[in-house]
């Protein structure tokens, strides 16, 4: 009877998780989706604690409270610019937990309360450890890449560590053969480990074998992610989210826990689908992401699309007065946010500008690229935080055709997602779908400097006749324009 109630509770929690994913698919229902997720997780934790097999309450409850407290604190204080790093770090926790549970399961085999030795169970333990180790180390490297590399002076002295954590892809010679060799070696070790547990008279696994699986899989996770450049990190974060789901699902098979199996499969499949959608919009192969830049070769991208050196190319600047005059005569405005907007914390100032223009009858909308920012949906979250109405926030495919009829496009902290070089061959973003802002009557790019974007290449948009550069802090610049418009 007790097990039946437990399974029913897990089934109810799984339904809430499905409803949560459905809610998170839209900005309008995202809050409700989060509530469903909280209800589902609370139900799962309570049902587990009431299980008669669980009796270490003096250990579990304090750890649950400490973990929940840390999570609540980090969620409250994290800046929007640090959200991608936090997400990557959370993925690493899932991988680390799976590895630790795998080792604990190995130690409990053949003991009271542990699983009976069998080849199938041994395979489940070893596969869970392999996926968990890949997720853990890959997520840590992604965290370092998103953070911008190693920040501690002592750590910077460690050979090759800065290259591993840098935004540029680290493409080792024969990397595909190394990846394939590591994966095959892990599978062989898994087979040996499972065979030992399946042998007649076996009563324990081998810590040496699963330790080797952990080390090799961890190295594989590092190598897979270091081969991917900074411009593709949003896809990597999404794929690591998928890995964390499959890790949880593998742990579910190992622990005979239906809830983990269902929840992990939901997270894994949804993350994989999102990664595929993002890869398609960036003209990337999903296999290139999974296998660490498979098929890609180091290439020196042209800085600009003409033979004229960057330092000799002239840009036309604009100030608050000039932009105010342009906005006063505009009937349609599109705002393109990027990671620089998050860095400048300019979302509230941009919303103030939006309100002012809409009160004057100007048609103001936001154009969101699938990989704007450093993780999927980063800009949507940022704008929602500033209370920007959902109905004026549009995705690339819904707004790209409207640029030719737009009077002014304000590009705030975005670079690669509005780069015309995507329509040329021989550079890291060739073929990528971008917001074709240059087709509008006037584009204004808000930037601190003329530095290149995350992809490491220059942007010919800056030098077009209908473009103006507004240099300086985006929040202060937008605030000046708002002040002028009110005056």
Image (cartoon, rainbow, N blue to C red):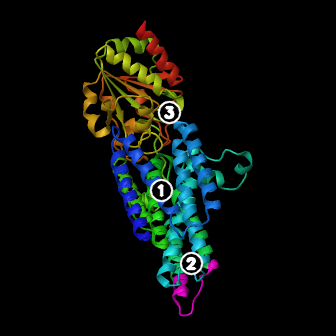
Question: In the rendering, which numbered label is found on residue 446?
Answer: none
Residue at label 3? 342
Is residue 271 among the parts visible in the rendering? yes
* Left or right side of 16 for 92: right
Residue drawn at point x = 56 percent, y = 60 percent = 136
Indicate the secondary structure of the residue bearing disc 3: helix
Residue at label 2? 114
Q: Position of residue 74 (x, y in %)?
A: 58, 43
Indicate the secondary structure of the residue bearing disc 2: loop
Q: Position of residue 215 (x, y in %)?
A: 61, 69
Nearer-N-terminus badge (1/2)? 2
Query: Disc 3, disc 2: CB below 8 Å?
Result: no
Q: Is residue 117 above or below residue 172?
A: below
Q: Residue furthest top?
A: 487
Residue drawn at point x = 40 percent, y = 48 percent = 426
Is residue 431 among the parts visible in the rendering? no
Nearer-N-terminus badge (3/1)? 1
Q: Which residues are magenta?
A: 192-208
**C-alpha span from label 1 to label 2:** 30 Å
**C-alpha span from label 3 to label 2:** 49 Å
Q: Position of residue 147 (x, y in %)?
A: 58, 44
Q: Position of residue 91 (x, y in %)?
A: 52, 55
Which quadrant would the N terminus be assigned to in this image? bottom left
Q: Is residue 204 magenta?
A: yes
């Amino acid at each position: 009877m007790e097990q039946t109630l437990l399974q029913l509770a897990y089934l109810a929690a799984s339904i809430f998780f499905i409803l949560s994913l459905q809610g998170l698919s839209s900005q309008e229902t995202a809050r409700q989706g989060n509530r469903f997720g909280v209800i589902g997780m609370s139900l799962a934790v309570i049902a587990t604690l009431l299980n008669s097999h669980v009796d270490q309450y003096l250990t579990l409850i304090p750890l649950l409270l400490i973990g929940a407290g840390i999570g609540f604190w980090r969620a409250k204080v994290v800046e929007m610019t640090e959200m991608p790093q936090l997400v990557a770090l959370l993925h690493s926790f899932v991988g680390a937990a799976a590895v630790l549970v795998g080792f604990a399961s190995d130690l409990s085999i053949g003991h009271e309360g542990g699983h009976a030795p069998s080849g199938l169970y041994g395979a489940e333990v070893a596969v869970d450890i392999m996926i968990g180790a890949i997720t853990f180390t890959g997520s840590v490297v992604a965290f370092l890449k998103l953070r911008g590399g190693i920040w501690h002076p002592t750590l910077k002295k460690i050979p090759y560590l800065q290259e591993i954590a840098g935004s540029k892809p680290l493409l080792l010679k024969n990397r595909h053969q190394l990846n394939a060799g590591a994966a095959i070696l892990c599978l062989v070790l898994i087979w040996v480990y499972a065979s030992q547990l399946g042998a007649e008279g076996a009563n324990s696994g081998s810590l040496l074998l699963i330790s080797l699986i952990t080390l090799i899989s961890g190295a594989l996770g590092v190598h897979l992610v270091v081969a991917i450049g900074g411009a593709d990190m949003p896809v990597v974060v999404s794929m690591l989210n998928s890995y964390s789901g499959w890790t949880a699902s593998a742990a579910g098979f190992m622990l005979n826990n239906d809830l983990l199996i269902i929840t992990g499969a939901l997270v894994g499949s949804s993350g994989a689908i999102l990664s595929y959608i993002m890869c398609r919009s960036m003209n990337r192969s999903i296999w290139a992401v999974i296998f660490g830049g498979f098929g890609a070769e180091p290439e020196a991208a042209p800085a600009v699309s003409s033979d004229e050196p960057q330092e000799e190319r002239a840009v036309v600047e604009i100030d608050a007065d000039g932009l105010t005059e342009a906005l006063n005569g505009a009937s349609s405005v599109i705002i393109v946010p990027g990671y620089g907007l998050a860095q400048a914390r300019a979302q509230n100032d941009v919303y103030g500008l939006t309100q002012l223009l809409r009160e004057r009858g100007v048609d103001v909308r936001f154009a969101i690229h699938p990989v704007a920012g450093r993780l999927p949906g980063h800009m949507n979250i940022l704008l929602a935080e500033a209370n920007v109405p959902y109905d004026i926030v549009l995705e690339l495919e819904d707004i790209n055709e409207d640029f030719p009829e737009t009077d002014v496009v304000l590009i705030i902290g975005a670079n690669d997602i509005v780069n015309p070089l995507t329509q040329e061959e021989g550079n890291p973003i060739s073929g990528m779908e971008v917001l074709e802002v240059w087709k509008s009557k006037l584009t204004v790019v808000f930037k601190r400097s003329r530095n290149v974007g995350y992809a490491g290449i220059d942007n010919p948009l800056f030098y077009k006749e209908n473009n103006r550069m507004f240099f300086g802090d985006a929040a202060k610049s937008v605030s000046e324009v708002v002040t002028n418009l009110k005056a």
